[in-house]
């Protein structure tokens, strides 16, 4: 059972984040209504997510398929969309179908084809983002900026996939100036992608920015910011992380 103190903390945190989002948007000459707040709820309980769904949060993001299944089946998002934002193993794609309104982390043609086949089998159109490894980190998923274009072409050609934009996570070790430069690079990549005028795509989503850097992400064009600890507080990985951990297999 969440305490009143925890509920108050979440409400105050979300209000503060919303104020910061609006200020950053106005500074960039943007409409604050054009930026969505995604609550990154990895390791958070169903009870925590249900409580936060009553706050001005637009959608929820899950890193692990098991948690997406658990929370979707429990209606923890209370009618708000759920996105899949973590590394997606190909053998778990079927479980995401019908649960994730948007898969933000497609990063290879192999995964793309798995999503296409699963969406066709489920008789639905799955919206996706292409994840870019903008910092070129060996430890991270994502396609390189140089390899983006063939993957975009392939995604736009799939009949049961709808391409909506790009996602990225800059290196955690980057300075604020370096991080903002990565965000600016992402904005430029989205603009170039939109200029390709794909028939089966709408390149209007740029998902970037987390608890420590979301104002700069908004200043550089983010349309979705993914925020976890700034909403819920520090994660307690001892409770659920082991159960939900999904090691990245060798490719």
Image (cartoon, rainbow, N blue to C red):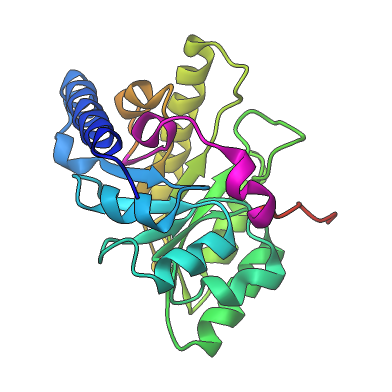
Q: Where is residue 82 in the image (x, y as percent from the top left)?
A: 38, 60
Magenta residue span? 223-244
Residue 221 x %, y %: 33, 32
Locate the C terminus and report the quarter of the image it occupies: bottom right
Residue 94 lies in quadrant: bottom right
Instruction: Residue at 52%, 85% (x, y): give it.
Output: 120
- Judge whether 235 appears above or below 96 on screen: above
Taking 235 as reference, is 125 above or below it?
A: below
Answer above or below: position of 98 versus 27: below
Q: Does the magenta stretch include residue 192?
A: no
Q: Nearer the viewer, residue 12 or 161?
A: 12
* Residue at point 27%, 29% (across, down): 13
Q: Depth check: 231 or 20 in front?
A: 231
From the viewer's perspective, tell me whether residue 220 is left or right of residue 13: right
The picture places residue 248, in percent across and down from the top left corner, at 76, 52
- Residue, x 59% and y 16% (percent of image)? 174
Q: Quadrant of residue 142?
A: top right
């Amino acid at each position: 059972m969440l305490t009143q103190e925890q509920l108050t903390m979440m409400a105050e945190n979300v209000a503060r984040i919303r104020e910061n989002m609006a200020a950053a948007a106005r500074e960039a000459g943007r409409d604050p209504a054009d930026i969505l707040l995604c609550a990154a709820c990895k390791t958070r309980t169903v009870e925590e997510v249900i409580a936060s769904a009553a706050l001005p949060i637009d959608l929820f993001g899950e890193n692990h398929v098991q948690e997406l299944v658990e929370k979707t089946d429990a209606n923890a998002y209370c009618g708000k969309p759920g996105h899949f934002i973590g590394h997606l193993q190909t053998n778990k794609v079927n479980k995401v179908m019908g649960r994730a309104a948007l898969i933000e982390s497609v990063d290879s043609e192999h995964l793309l084809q798995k999503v296409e086949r699963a969406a066709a089998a489920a008789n639905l159109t799955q919206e996706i983002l292409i994840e870019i490894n903008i910092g070129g980190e060996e430890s991270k998923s994502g396609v390189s900026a140089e390899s983006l274009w063939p993957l975009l072409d392939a995604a736009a050609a799939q009949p049961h996939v709808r391409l909506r934009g790009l996602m990225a996570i800059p290196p955690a070790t980057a300075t604020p100036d370096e991080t903002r430069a990565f965000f600016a690079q992402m904005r430029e990549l989205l603009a170039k992608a939109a200029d390709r005028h794909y028939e089966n795509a709408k390149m209007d989503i740029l998902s970037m920015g987390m608890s420590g850097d979301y104002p700069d992400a908004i200043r550089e064009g983010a349309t979705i910011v993914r925020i976890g600890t700034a909403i819920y507080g520090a994660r307690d990985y001892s409770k659920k992380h082991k159960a939900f951990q999904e090691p990245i297999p060798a490719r």
